[in-house]
Amino acid sequence: MTDSTGAEAITSGSIRHPVQLTPMQVPKASDVLADDLRERILRGEFPEGTALPPERELVAQTRMSRTTVREALRILEVQGLVQIRTGRAGGAFVQRPGEESIASTVSLLIRGRQVRMAALLETREAVEPACAQLAAKYRTDADLEALDRANDAIAAEGSLADFLQANVDWHVAVAVASHNELLTGFMGALSRAIYASTDNSGFIDAAVRQTTVRAHRNITEAIRKRDASAAVRRMTRHVHEYASAVLEVEERTEIEVPGD
């Protein structure tokens, strides 16, 4: 209440202040649509491989603009939840997140935060023995074949790049044999980051290669025999010895992992 001069009236000894509202963040229409479609995909309403309605139908159903619909689909594509195909049989097709999605996210975190080499190696020492333990418990014949192929590639007289790739393949194969999707994706990113950021030319020589071959074959044999205790023990020793050797020659405290 105000008087004729426009001043605020005093009621019961107090002054009435105008109500103030805080600014509200209104989500973009494309984010709202992307959120709705994402939840439906993750709940399984749209099975993998299902084609979402054509763009013009989404526009009609949602009453949103074509630009909004396209932006929403692009968000889902970046998140790995749909695959956009062009051509007469094109459209947006549902795909479920896989191990590579995890690996990509972890790789971005490692590169973006410039994670220290010591932290990467500590994480590996904590995680890989668990992978070996689960691999010994759940491995299949196909898993053993993948491990044997990687071991043969590691033992071959190839280039340093070939050796490093075979090494990564073996460590990822152990994680795959655990049949734990989170561990598989995580180890894919972790192994690539460690090997990509190590001074391999000055560190890996013939002796290191021979030691790696023996360690990998011993761990593989424990996994083959379903001897979880031996698998854990051997993997723990292997990754610890590697970490100790790397840190002896690694003077950097931060890393920059090159892009794929």
Image (cartoon, rainbow, N blue to C red):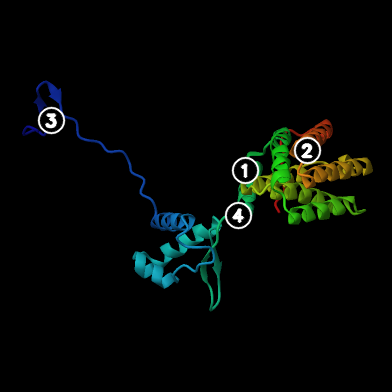
- Work out whether residue 209 can be spotted: yes
Q: Which mark is residue 8?
A: 3
- Judging depth in this view, the residue of 11 and 43 nearest the camera is 43
Q: Are marks 3 and 4 in contact (CB under 8 Å)?
A: no
Is 62 left or right of 77, judged from the image as shown? left
- Work out whether residue 107 can be spotted: no
What is the C-alpha distance between the residues marked 3 and 4?
63 Å
Q: Disc 3 vs disc 4: which is toward the camera?
A: 4
Give the crowd class for mark 2: few <14, some 14-19, many >=20 residues within 10 Å. Answer: many
Label 4 element class: loop
Q: Disc 1 vs disc 4: which is toward the camera?
A: 4
Q: Disc 4 vs disc 2: which is toward the camera?
A: 2
- The residue beneath circle 4 is 98
- Judging depth in this view, the residue of 36 and 217 nearest the camera is 217
- The residue beneath circle 1 is 109
Q: Quadrant of residue 113?
A: top right
